[in-house]
Image (spheres, grey):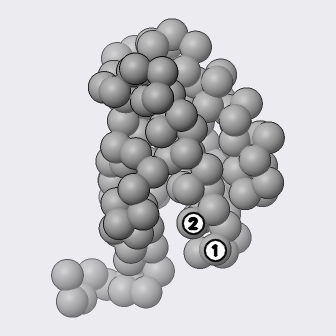
Amino acid sequence: MRVRVTVEGGESGDADDLLNWLRKDPAGAEARPLLTGGSPDQMGAGETIQAAFDTALATGGFVIAAATWLEARRERGTERRRLRIERDGNRKVVTVDGADSEQIEEALRALLDSDENPEGRGQ
């Protein structure tokens, strides 16, 4: 699975900061994150982080690592940041506001839903 992560409501330097955080985290590093171009209204510099996973467990670890970064930035008083995670282009999109376990679980269910339900039944 491939995902793109952008920070909405972020500041200049957020992309590099998140990328460095993910590369230092074992679960984040496993996804081989790369910095790419994005839309100009995201992350201050219009950059996106792309990552790839082989398993649902790796996806979960990556989302938790990214949400932990977001929560750490919130402690610095920057509460407007959110993570937008897109899977397969815009086919699956989730927004993460922090490291709340229920929110992370919902985000993972939405991202992984097409693996369990490729034809969209039961939604």
* Number of other residues with Cα within 10 Å of mark 1, as a class: few under 14, some 14 to 19, many 20 or more: few
Pointer 2 and pointer 1: residues touching (CB < 8 Å)? yes
Between the residue at mark 2 and the residue at mark 1, the CA separation in whole angstroms equals 5 Å
Is residue 89 something one can see in this rendering? no
Image location of residue 110, percent across then percent down: 35, 68
Q: Quadrant of residue 14?
A: top right
Query: Left or right of 25: which side holds 121?
Result: left
Q: Which residue lies under the disc numbered 1?
A: 57
Residue at point 54% right, 55% down? 63
Callout 1 amino acid: Leu
Q: Is residue 31 above or below residue 5?
A: below
Q: Nearer the viewer, residue 55 or 9?
A: 9
* Number of other residues with Cα within 10 Å of mark 2, as a class: few under 14, some 14 to 19, many 20 or more: many
Tell me the number on the disc at residue 11.
none
Callout 2 amino acid: Gly
Query: In the rendered image, which quarter contains the C terminus?
Result: bottom left
Q: Is residue 81 above or below residue 101?
A: above
Image location of residue 18, percent across then percent down: 61, 31
Image location of residue 59, percent across then percent down: 59, 64
Is residue 108 something one can see in this rendering? yes
Name the element at disc 1.
helix
Residue at point 42% right, 63% down? 101
Tell me the number on the disc at residue 60.
2
